[in-house]
Image (spheres, rainbow, N blue to C red):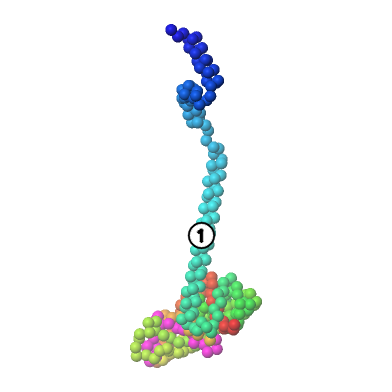
Amino acid sequence: MITPRKGLLLVVLVLLLCGLLNARWTGWLSRPVTNTIDTVQYPAGWVASRLKSDPPIKEKVYEEDELRDKLRETQRYNAELWVENAELQEQIEAFKAIANIQDIKAIRPVQAPVSAYNADPVNPTMKLLRGSLQGIKVDDAVAYKQNLIGFIQEVGPLTSTVKLITSQDFRSEVMIMPPDRVRAGNNWPYIDWVESDKKGGFYIGEIAKSTSSALRPGDVVRVRDSLRKSANGFVLGEIISIEDHPTNPTQDSRVHIAPNTPIGPQREVTVITDRTD
């Protein structure tokens, strides 16, 4: 019968024998003991891993803030790209409109940012961040897409001032066309002079009823200026009403015209200057 003392002595002898022999021959003896020890230690290791504390909260919050900053930076950059894209699209539309009006080989359109707008009712002006260094000259026409805005009044090396068509002393020769050009039985275009109505619009002061009967509200009024040819073909506005002349209502009419686009809120306009290169 194996007593506890004999069993202990037997284990000691086995371990001593394993220490003296080669590990390749004794592995089958020591492996059961090793496995037993690992099995006993595993629950303790599992409990210790579960009791281990999480990383500090401060470090996690810092990482989240950094991601938010990068997100905001990306959103700002994306918004800037959208604005730049919109400006480029607007420039393309402007050049297409100008190419349909004038010979693009004979002129040089200069895109000019607007730095200031003076809404003086007598002499409204607009300040541009382009000047003589970009080839701009006095009396060059200033347009927004196909619409005439005004004429260059003063020029510096890097800036220029525009006298707007809503000035109270504005006067120009124009030609009037129906918007669809399908109205038959009339001689188009109709040529006449317009002047400021001192309210931001224009009018033809006196026109024979036999002629005005061919006109309609919505007809397009374009510039036909023999002295300032850079403005020719651009839209001045459209007819909004045709009324009896106040002093000769049976024979004559008065035609009222409004600008085709609001003048003042433009961020960028096009100066039409001669191509000299």
Location of residue 36 in the rendering, given as x and y in whole percent from the top left corner: 46, 22
The answer to whether 81 is drawn above or below residue 8 in the figure is below
The residue lying toward the viewer, choosing from 162 and 124, is 162
The residue lying toward the viewer, choosing from 101 and 159, is 101
The answer to whether 6 is drawn above or below residue 199 in the figure is above
Location of residue 57 in the rendering, given as x and y in whole percent from the top left corner: 54, 39
How many callouts does the rendering have? 1
Q: Is residue 84 visible?
A: yes
Residue drawn at 61 percent across, 77 percent down: 134
Residue sticking out furthest to the left: 184
Location of residue 118 in the rendering, given as x and y in whole percent from the top left corner: 57, 73
Prevailing secondary structure class for the magenta stretch in the rendered image: loop
User: Does 116 sit left or right of 180 as displayed?
Assistant: right
Residue drawn at 49 percent across, 73 percent down: 92
User: Does 205 sit left or right of 114 as displayed?
Assistant: left
Residue sticking out furthest to the right: 157
Q: Is residue 166 visible?
A: no
The amino acid type of the residue labelled 1 equals Asn
The range drawn in magenta is: 209-228
Q: Which residue is mark 1?
A: 78
Q: Quadrant of the C terminus?
A: bottom right
The residue lying toward the viewer, choosing from 130 and 119, is 130
Q: Residues within 10 Å of mark 1 (few under 14, many from 20)?
A: few
Q: Quadrant of the N terminus?
A: top left
The answer to whether 28 is drawn above or below residue 131 in the figure is above
Q: Secondary structure at mark 1?
A: helix
